[in-house]
Image: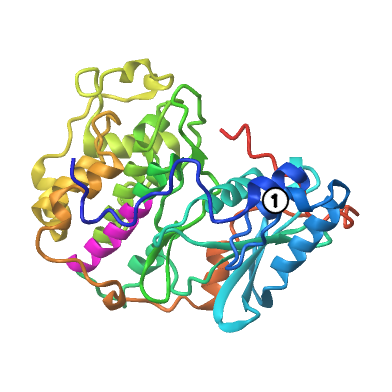
Amino acid sequence: MVDSPALSPRPNPPGAGPKTTTSKIMSINPKAKAVAILNTADKPIAMSADTTPSNGTADLAEQMNDDVRNQFVSGAKLGEGTYAIVYAGHYRHDPTRLVAIKKIKLNTTLKDGIAPDAIREIKHLSELSHPNIIQLHAIFSTKEQNISLVLEHLPLGDLEGLWKNHSISYGTPDIKSWASMLAQAVWFCHENFVLHRDIKGNNVLIAADGTLKLADFGLARSFADASRKMTCNVITRFYRPPELLLGCEHYGGKVDIWSTGIVIAELVLRDWFLPSNTDAEQLLAITQVFGTPTEETWPGVSTLKLAAILGASTRPQPMDYWRTKFSMLGPDGIDLLRSMLIMDPNKRFSARQVLEHRYWTSAPRPTKKEDLPKQGGGPAKVGEDLKRRAGELPSSGRGDKVARKLDFGSMR
């Protein structure tokens, strides 16, 4: 199988993370884990086990943390949510290199004092490096035990805000460009055995040069072990695939493909594609378009634990429905979209199949990212986009410990 021209760059080797010297540091002192494994600064701090006395590990972790924190200057507060405060910032040595500093609030009622979604975000962003995934520059903690994530500055809002802004006009080549960048981000995650599990328009942010960046990995998890059960209560409802609505607990990358297809459909419609108020309504909205699944169309559907909630039998919408509603995509684009939105996940396209589809090489060519329509997100929008995840309360008096061990296991 030949590689699609859209596949770029190559994925990280499975299990590989950023260019840090974390393995030696972790072997010295597990309490350095939070800082060491996630430090993706320009000049990683190199440590050597044979030159560091074992009784100096606390000072070592503290010095590492200070070195990372001092690389950045924090500025005005951009936004605050239940779980995080977002500040403007920049590199100390280069004020033109802007960043967003996301200060995760400490919650003493939680294990590690940090919400599970924040731990997931830290873990997976530290392992993924791709032009279409938000970059985690560094991470550090304060003496008050707050963890701060230094993230890429993405000032132009998100895809949902863009299609909702009807003062912005865009066409078929623009949609192809946005869809391509999102599809490449999803492909890269899956090649590195990471499920995003919350792909939606307002989790796809826009950089100053027009590049799309997949963000908010608070529900992400590894899916290398196919036998392990996972929760079906993930993915924002409008973007949740039918297998999760029916209670499936063994799934893979196809759940992200469904969500990606919905995002592309909303770009075309400039409206919600499958809105609902409840999970039952969501399943009804899906079956009204795609028909009620049967054992003939979806082998095994009747064995899913919530299959009994399927309503009366409905037929799928005819091809004319797709040609009318999604004419902007053209025949190849419609074929791709329908392949991403097949109800049976075993028949639904994989991320690689998406990028190998003829749609990407058919006319018209996608718009260059620098020529894409843009909206002015502004500082407040940066804060709004990034503040939604993580968790904090006032310090519990543990200010003498700079770095805390985070448990990355047991994430469903």
* Colour mode of the rendering: rainbow
Residue with the most extreme front position: 50
Three-letter residue code for mark 1: Ala
Whether residue 272 is visible: no
Q: Which of 131/390 is in front?
A: 131
Residue 165's x, y, as percent?
A: 35, 72
Residue 326: quadrant of the picture: bottom left
State yes or no: residue 180 in magenta. yes
Relative to 217, 326 lies left or right? left
Left/right of residue 46 with respect to residue 261 in the rendered view: right
The C terminus - image quarter: top right
Q: In which quarter of the image is the N terminus?
A: top left
Q: Label 1, secondary structure: give it.
A: helix
Residue at numbered disc 1: 34
Please give left or right for residue 196 compared with residue 290 in the image: right
Q: At 39% across and 20% down in the image, what residue appears? A: 304
Depth check, front residue: 381 or 75: 75
In the depicted structure, whether residue 348 falls above or below residue 270: above
Q: Give the range drawn in magenta.
A: 172-185
